[in-house]
Amino acid sequence: MQINITQLRDSLADKGLKVTPQRMNILEAIYSLNNHPTAENIISYVREKHPNVATGTVYKVLDTLVENELIKKVKTDSDTMRYDGIMNHHHHLYCTECELIEDYVDEDLDKILKNYFKKKNFSGFTVEEVVLQIRGKFDKC
Amino acid sequence: MQINITQLRDSLADKGLKVTPQRMNILEAIYSLNNHPTAENIISYVREKHPNVATGTVYKVLDTLVENELIKKVKTDSDTMRYDGIMNHHHHLYCTECELIEDYVDEDLDKILKNYFKKKNFSGFTVEEVVLQIRGKFDKC
DNA sequence: ACCTAAATGAGAATAATTCTTAATAAAGAA
DNA sequence: TTCTTTATTAAGAATTATTCTCATTTAGGT
């Protein structure tokens, strides 16, 4: 990731959030850990350098970051929540064999979907966002 | 739901599963409770008539039913798993205001997506199923 | 009716997350 | 810079959803 300290700091400040070391570390962890880390993954990473960060703090900070649209939550079939630092609209590839979740960006597809739903015009429901869960198998699995 | 006892019994037997009252009750609960009940919802429903069904049994039966493709798990953004008795391929409308998840069946859309992904031909990944999470707002909310 | 493997009940155990409270620290004001 | 206010954090207890263990029961074939 080519995110630097100043950018992290600004992304917090721009949302009117206090810039604390914990928040900085957690943001950095999410950008450094590739592929949708769990809270657990993030806690381990942060504790390598800052062993006394409390579990509750990490969860609280993650919630705050999600609320302020600095990161996203990703739900999986298992029971643990995972987090995603990429805020551009994207879909997810779920492998049925392994735990890997890969991001999938496809603007053409998004255009097609947007058109489709515009034409469709649900009665009683306004579409805001469409995210695809693409299930399948990586060849290597 | 227009599912009768005999149909429930057969759906279990066809999969080679023993037909137990617990399994029958749980299946019936899922079909009767509209809109993607949680395990909790199912437990309450079943216990109205059969107060001594164990929590663990319900979870075990739900797993068995999912494994045998008699029901599906539905992922939500919150931390509780929900279940779905409709096995035809379908998508979900998620309301950002309320807890309701509505099924959405659209064969035209499925055709479009199928074609799109056939042409696209990911390298290194074989698509098996595409499910849309359609987020938005019901007008009534 | 009998046998055997599979299913269940009861409740303890675990895992992930949330809550509580006192102590600490960030950011603006003086 | 120092002070003040208020949000944030550490620590660990509490909660919630789910899984596990094991003794007992039961479905379904014989």
Image (spheres, coloured by chain):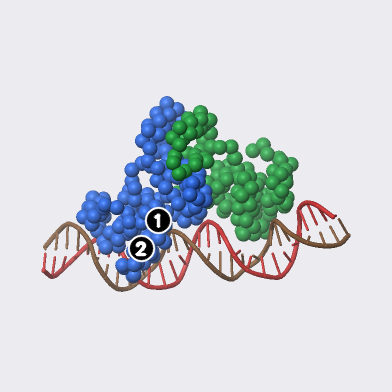
Chain colours: A blue, B green, C brown, D red
Does residue A110 appear to the left or right of A21 in the view shown? Answer: right
Q: Which residue is mark 2?
A: A45
Determine whether B4 is above or below C24 in the image: above
Quarter of the image for the N terminus of chain B: give it: top right
Q: Residue at x 38, y 64 (%)?
A: A44
- Let me know if marks 2 and 1 both belong to one chain: yes
Q: Earlier in the sequence, mark 2 or mark 1?
A: 1
A94 lies above or below A29:
above
Q: Is residue B83 left or right of residue D6?
A: right
**Residue D22 vertical position relative to residue B102 in the rendered view, above or below:** below
Amino acid type assigned to the residue bearing label 2 in the image: Tyr
| Closer to the camera in the image, A62 or B40 | A62
Expressed as whole percent of the image width and height from the top left, the position of residue B129 reads: 52, 40
Label for residue A37? Answer: 1
Determine the chain carrying the residue at label 2: A
**Disc 1 chain ID:** A
